[in-house]
Image (spheres, rainbow, N blue to C red):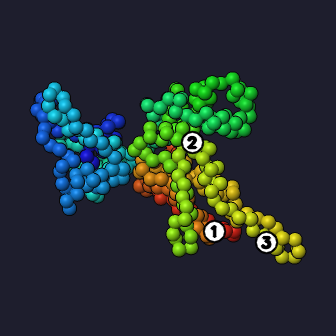
Amino acid sequence: MSALANAAALLGKPRGYLVFGVEDGTHAVVGTAFDPLAEKAKGGQLLPVWLSQGLQPNGAFEMYAFEYQGKRIVLFETYPAVDRPVRFYGTACVRDGTSKAQLRNYPEKERALWSQRVDWSAQVCERATLDDLASDALTKARSEFRGKSPAQAADVEGWDDATFLNKAKLTIRGGITHAALLLLGRPESASLLAPAVARITWLLKNERNEDLDYEHFDPPFLLNVDRVLARIRNLTVRELPEGTLFPVELTQYDPWVIREALHNCIAHQDYGLRGRIQVVETPDALLFTNVGGFCRGGWRPSSRRMRLWRFIAIRFSPRPWSI
């Protein structure tokens, strides 16, 4: 599975396949009695669980059992590696002709995998259409576009949705990108991004780190950022500057900084790792986290819309705050 994922990436293929029930070389359909759901792996684990835990960083694959030409076929479908090799319990493999070999023996192929930069956000979701986008999010996007591009403000009203999204670079020749679904998609459209997870979770904890409340927020993130911020208790505090008798009122946290941190978590999340963005509120701090990974040799931005960061944890304390 590691070899197939890495080979698929090197060859620019959308998937890699492992097929049981078809003979090598001749491709004759012979059928199979192999049942992956009944097989046990090391430690008595079910085979799919063991495979999923061992394949890193994404562990993403699908299994299918079906009949073809009257014979039972079992097919494993794996996703290609993205910007780093896929390893199986620490070992990366690759296809060499019809054989499997360790990737470390092919340094040129390993370098090619590390140097590949796939802009996940710019990839087109083939199943998505304009109907999967929320109308209120589109209205908000148009308003923001007019503010950022005043020279085109007069033209925006005459654009239909397809034209506007192309101008805003959220679609590619009419194809709905992952970024468009994240920012403007209806809540139910998040399933189109699978196996990626598009969700922000707000958690409220007490001084003993016990959960008091929580809420999940799905797309459209362009609107739901404000709903996340509304859940954060940003109290008004009063300070008395030296040399005056008049107190100054301040919010406990700077709203602009909180919004910027949340925007960064959305933009720099590695959605392929299937993790969620978390906003954890405690009596004395806010903690923003997302998941991602640095490229080997340091992080270098390359994406037009979203970049991959290592696990980001930003902690805010009441004023004066620090990161």
Q: Tell me the SS state at disc 1.
A: loop
Residue at numbered disc 3: 239
Among the two numbered marks 3 and 2 on one chain, the one whose residue lies closer to the N terminus: 2
Q: Quadrant location of the C terminus?
A: bottom right
Label of residue 293 in the image: none
Q: Is residue 116 above or below residue 214?
A: above
Of circles 2 and 1, the one toward us is 2
Of circles 3 and 2, the one toward us is 2
What type is the residue that disc 3 sits on? Glu
**How far across and down, in percent of the image, does residue 174 sit?**
52, 26
What type is the residue that disc 1 sits on? Ser
Say which residue appears at 82% left-offset and 73% top-offset.
Answer: 241
Say which residue appears at 74% left-offset and 65% top-offset.
Answer: 236
Rendered image quadrant of residue 34: top left
Residue at numbered disc 1: 317
Rendered image quadrant of residue 20: top left
Q: Tell me the SS state at disc 3.
A: strand
Residue at numbered disc 2: 220
- Are there few (<14), some (14-19), or many (20+) residues within 10 Å of tag 1? some
Rendered image quadrant of residue 214: bottom right
Q: Can the viewer see residue 210?
A: yes
